[in-house]
């Protein structure tokens, strides 16, 4: 892929693509398109695991095409369609009762759209993509922050035993997520909020999701890919907001 952008954006893009590889590979073991934990429907019993294998294989092919810039823009559009059809649509059919995982599928899509704006034909849409991503991430982080106070014991049990003061960190993480969800909507604090959120979730990837996955296995591997992906998206957006030709404000694109 032509490196139009460097530093944090490049790092974030690599993190996002690696996360998509991990999630796609896990789908082969799960026998279902399990990223973002979409609800199960009985009619899928006759389609899975074939549908999961086919969808995940196509995703991996698309990721390779993006990595080596082989019709990368078309590959990204295909990725967006696959995630929407195999994950987002299942959340919609479930009436978004699981709103957090529903928004996860949206920011997985928005991450691919963000990478797509690196291509010359799509750079003119970058401001709109960033603005949309701000809204999606703000709502997602708000929902996650509230969940830390609604279900503190559940959140505490997600933290590995070797970390002290687990309940304190549950509430601290909730406060940080809520502040971050507000900060990314305020132009003055957007870059700071995105960088801090990216580092916070990268910390969870290292200290929480990886140890849980290696210890407990199973669907904890989904958390590994999801945390790496959203952290990478935050870093991509942080770097893009630093470009002089972009000024993202509520209702304004440039």
Image: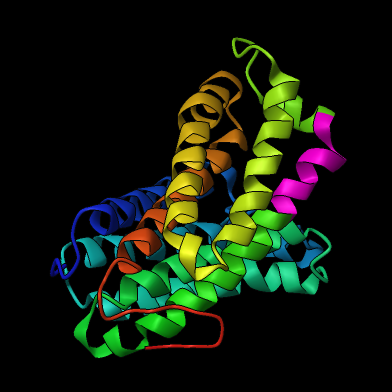
Quadrant containing the C terminus is bottom left
User: Quick check: 218 left or right of 144?
Assistant: left
Residue lying at 76% horizontally and 40% vertically, measured from the top left: 148
Q: Is residue 46 magenta?
A: no
| Above or below for 250 versus 243 | below
Quadrant containing the N terminus is bottom left
Q: Which residues are magenta?
A: 143-152
**Along the viewing direction, whichever of 20 and 27 lies nearer the viewer:** 20
Is residue 176 in sight in this rendering? yes
What's the image's color scheme? rainbow
Q: Position of residue 25 (x, y in %)?
A: 43, 46
Q: Which of the 4 quarters of the picture holds residue 74?
A: bottom left
Q: Position of residue 150 (x, y in %)?
A: 86, 42
**Along the viewing direction, whichever of 188 and 161 lies nearer the viewer:** 188
| Above or below for 75 versus 225 | below
User: Quick check: 64 left or right of 52?
Assistant: left
**Along the viewing direction, whichever of 102 and 54 lies nearer the viewer:** 102
Residue lying at 60% horizontally and 34% vertically, measured from the top left: 220
User: Quick check: 68 left or right of 243?
Assistant: left
**Along the viewing direction, whichever of 10 and 134 lies nearer the viewer:** 134
Q: Residue furthest front?
A: 188
Q: Position of residue 62 (x, y in %)?
A: 32, 67
Q: Which of the 4 quarters of the picture holds residue 89?
A: bottom right
Residue lying at 24% horizontally and 56% vertically, measured from the top left: 10
Residue lying at 65% horizontally and 36% vertically, measured from the top left: 173
Q: Is residue 147 magenta?
A: yes
Is residue 83 in sight in this rendering? no
Picture mark count: 0
Q: Residue furthest left?
A: 2
Magenta stretch: dominant secondary structure: helix
| Above or below for 102 versus 196 | below
Q: Position of residue 124 (x, y in %)?
A: 31, 89
């Amino acid at each position: 892929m032509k490196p139009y952008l460097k530093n944090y954006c490049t790092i974030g893009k690599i993190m996002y693509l690696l996360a998509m590889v991990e999630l796609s590979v896990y789908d082969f073991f799960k026998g279902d398109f399990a990223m973002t934990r979409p609800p199960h429907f009985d009619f899928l019993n006759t389609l899975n695991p074939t549908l999961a294998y086919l969808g995940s294989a196509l995703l991996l092919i698309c990721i390779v095409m993006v990595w080596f810039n082989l019709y990368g823009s078309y590959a990204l559009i295909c990725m967006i369609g696959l995630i929407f059809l195999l994950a987002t649509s299942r959340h919609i059919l479930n009436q978004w009762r699981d709103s957090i995982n529903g928004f996860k599928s949206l920011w997985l899509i928005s991450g691919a759209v963000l990478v797509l704006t690196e291509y010359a034909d799509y750079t003119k849409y970058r401001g709109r993509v960033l603005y949309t991503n701000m809204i999606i991430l703000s709502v997602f982080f708000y929902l996650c922050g509230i969940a830390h106070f609604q279900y503190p014991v559940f959140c505490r049990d997600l933290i590995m035993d070797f970390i002290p003061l687990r309940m304190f960190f549950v509430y601290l993480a909730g406060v940080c997520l809520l502040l971050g969800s507000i900060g990314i909507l305020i132009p003055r604090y957007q870059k700071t909020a995105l960088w801090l959120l990216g580092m916070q979730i990268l910390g969870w990837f290292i200290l929480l999701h990886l140890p849980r996955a290696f210890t407990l296995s199973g669907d904890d591997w989904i958390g590994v890919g999801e945390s790496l992906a959203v952290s990478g998206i935050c870093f991509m957006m942080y770097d893009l907001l630093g470009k002089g030709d972009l000024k993202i404000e509520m209702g304004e694109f440039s």
